[in-house]
Amino acid sequence: MNGGDAAATVVTALDLAPYRSSADTLLWGSLILDAVMLVCAYVLTRLAVGRALRPVRTMTDQATQWSAVASETRFNTGSGPVELARLGTSLDALLDRIRAVLRHEQQLTGSCPTSCGRHSPGSSPNSTGGGPGPARPRRPAPLTR
């Protein structure tokens, strides 16, 4: 080897089974960890949303109980976040409007002859203009540009 033209080639074989086994183990571990993280994220999100919507659920229950009560302050709009106070005010106004409509319909059906009971207000073919006018559509028209 002191100046010769000798060249050597070394060939080795290495078993790749341990590397493949560890790759499979790592893949399964990663999938299990992903599933656990997904379940934890779902549970935490569910808890956070449930806790955030608890005041709305309370207001909904109060609206159900107080729908028969005519009051300007059905919901306690003074405490809590501003958004909930605005929601309470809106729900109060909505319940007042529903109450007024129901009261108007009861007065209308109470003062109408028995033949009027078969028609909705304003849809009687014999209407002489003394009624509330043509019935409004129940659904708003689609918005067009």
Image: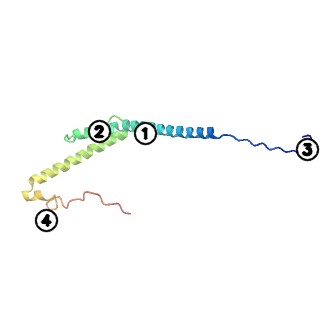
Distance, label 3 to label 4, CA atoms, is: 120 Å
Q: Residue furthest top?
A: 79
Disc number placed over residue 119 in the picture, else none: none
* Position of residue 142 measured from the top left corner of the image (x, y, whole percent): 33, 60
Residue pointed to by mark 3: 4
Q: 10 Å neighbourhood of mark 3: few (<14), some, or many (≥20)?
A: few
Contact between marks 3 and 1 (CB within 8 A): the answer is no
Q: Specify the amino acid type for callout 1.
A: Tyr
- Marks 3 and 2: which is nearer the front? 3
Distance, label 4 to label 1, CA atoms, is: 58 Å
Q: 10 Å neighbourhood of mark 1: few (<14), some, or many (≥20)?
A: few
Residue pointed to by mark 4: 125
Contact between marks 4 and 2 (CB within 8 A): the answer is no
SS for tag 4? Answer: loop
Pick whichever of labels 4 and 2 is earlier in the sequence. 2
* Position of residue 10 measured from the top left corner of the image (x, y, whole percent): 78, 42
Residue pointed to by mark 1: 42
Q: Residue at x 25, y 40 (%)?
A: 63
Residue pointed to by mark 2: 59
* Position of residue 6 measured from the top left corner of the image (x, y, whole percent): 87, 44
* In this picture, residue 98 sits left or right of residue 8: left
Distance, label 2 to label 1, CA atoms, is: 26 Å
Pick whichever of labels 3 and 2 is earlier in the sequence. 3
- Marks 2 and 1: which is nearer the front? 1
* Position of residue 135 measured from the top left corner of the image (x, y, whole percent): 20, 59
Q: Residue at x 32, y 42 (%)?
A: 87
